Image: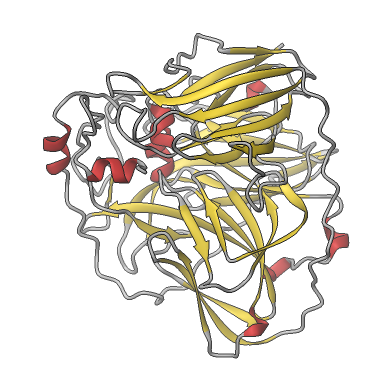
Amino acid sequence: MLNRRRLLGLGGAVGAGALVWPLREATDSVARENPDPHAHHQASSGGSDKAAKATAANPPPFTPFAERMPLPEVLKPVSTQGDFDVYELPMLAATNEIFPGVSTPVLTFGGQFIGPTIHARQGRAAKVTYINRLDRAATVHLHGGHVSSASDGFPMDLIEPGQSRVFEYPNQQPGASLWYHDHTHHMEAEHVYRGLAGLYLIEGDDEKELGLPSGTYDVPIVVRDGRFDEKGGMIFEPSPEPTMLHTNGRIQPYFPVAARKYRLRLLNTTLHRIIEVSLGGQELVQIASDGGLLAEPVSRTKITLTPGERAEVVVDFSRHEAGSHVLLTDARENEPIVRFDVTGTATDDSRVPDKLRALPALPKASNVRKVKFSMTADGTQFAINDKTFDHNRVDFRIKEGTTEIWEITNADTADGGTHGAIDHNFHMHLVPFRVLDRDGKAPLPGEQGLKDTILVSPGETVRVQATFSGFRGKYLYHCHIQEHSDIGMMATMEIV
């Protein structure tokens, strides 16, 4: 099967037509005058030639595991008022040392390549003023947030350079690991690739009673990918070459841990890579997914994460002696994510209870909808139900409070698709969903909880159920492989 990297590895042409992204000169500066939002996503024939001319990656030399993995800073409120907290978060160009001693130009929230983490509490609202100090328009989506349409970051609802906008997040939802990121149509993939993303963690009412690892022992791990030139500049163009993973803004870092239990919050923000998180066969006890805690912990040895997906696991490092090295990898590519260095012992009164929470009941569905992911017949764009995104069109109208089953099918198969088998994933704004089955079979381990992003493999049909309550207005559903949604694989639902 092909994701975009595999597709481009065949020269960008698979079948009669060719999906092509025009080339952009590799640069160590991200500033551009009047950036064309369509420039990276137009299509034409001649994919093999264009892909062959792509800038070759030549990253700066580095020593693996020489740099400590940093943790994102915590954004502090500028004020606290009644039942809500007030934050300010500028978007601006900056530099970051992805490679030691090399300054890479990036786009950031707050000047940080992994944007600062917002720690919210369930039931306590947050108001965030996003200030655009970039040379381009942008908007912000709280991925996994149950928010009003006005604060959801619709792709055409832009914050222009020099402007600001207040987004209101009520946090009337269970505790979960969310993330905020740019959602500008045609530019989302590049903006997120260059750095416009950060964590938004909601602390649930019941979590403290569970005794899970917390504080210093609650560690976020944000995985990104990139291709780099010799100056450390990020290359954003089609290429058959693989990307390199970097973690919390560092290439192949290490992180010191004590011989005790840790809670790891895993987030895949790569452009298109489906990663398979592994500790070399050691147990990963999954306790949460996109929408928060599972009903009960699930023992795993590998966890597959598509772009946008999250998983929370507890790892017990007491199984390793001081001085041991434990490598977290993407097992699909045998590529390091971070090396944990066990430095000594520490007291540990944390635990993983047998029951984590009661999931909401599944009400009876009143409607069934079909969603088909496919490349367009001419091979130039991606589509949902044979239509590319049009922000003026409403694709589904849904009555508030109703429960529906959606059947999501990936039609890009080796025999039935225009360009061979291509992976997609599905993300729904506003509300979480429950996975009912995959091709009639039970959900995968770790999918029994609340989800907002799921893998849909070539030829597969995944059925999900959601209740559309709380807000009215226009929201999106789309493939969260951002290069797919940027060129059409996105649609609008209106809750009425």
Q: Is residue 2 visible?
A: yes
Name the image quarter holding residue 219.
Answer: bottom right
Q: Residue at x 21, y 37 (%)?
A: 24
Q: Which residue is drawn at 67% across and 71% down?
A: 262
Horizontally, residue 335 falls left or right of residue 132, namely left
| Count of numbered badges drawn on the protein | 0
Dividing the image into 4 quarters, which one contains the N terminus? top left
Q: Can residue 144 be seen in this view?
A: no
Q: Residue at x 16, y 25 (%)?
A: 45
Horizontally, residue 277 falls left or right of residue 61, namely right
Q: Please name whichever residue, 52 or 283, is drawn nearer the observer in this view of the structure.
A: 283
**Compared with residue 431, is residue 278 higher up or lower down, i.e. above or below?**
below
Residue 7 percent location from the top left of the image: 28, 40
Q: Please name whichever residue, 185 or 306, is drawn nearer the observer in this view of the structure.
A: 306
Residue 234 percent location from the top left of the image: 29, 50
**Compared with residue 474, is residue 139 higher up or lower down, i.e. above or below?**
below
Dividing the image into 4 quarters, which one contains the C terminus? top right
Horizontally, residue 268 falls left or right of residue 474, namely left
**Compared with residue 33, is residue 71 higher up or lower down, i.e. above or below?**
below
Horizontally, residue 146 falls left or right of residue 305, namely right
Q: Which residue is drawn at 61% across and 13% down?
A: 396
Residue 23 percent location from the top left of the image: 19, 36
Residue 70 percent location from the top left of the image: 51, 66
What colour scheme was applied to this rendering of the protein?
Answer: secondary structure
Name the image quarter holding residue 217.
Answer: bottom right
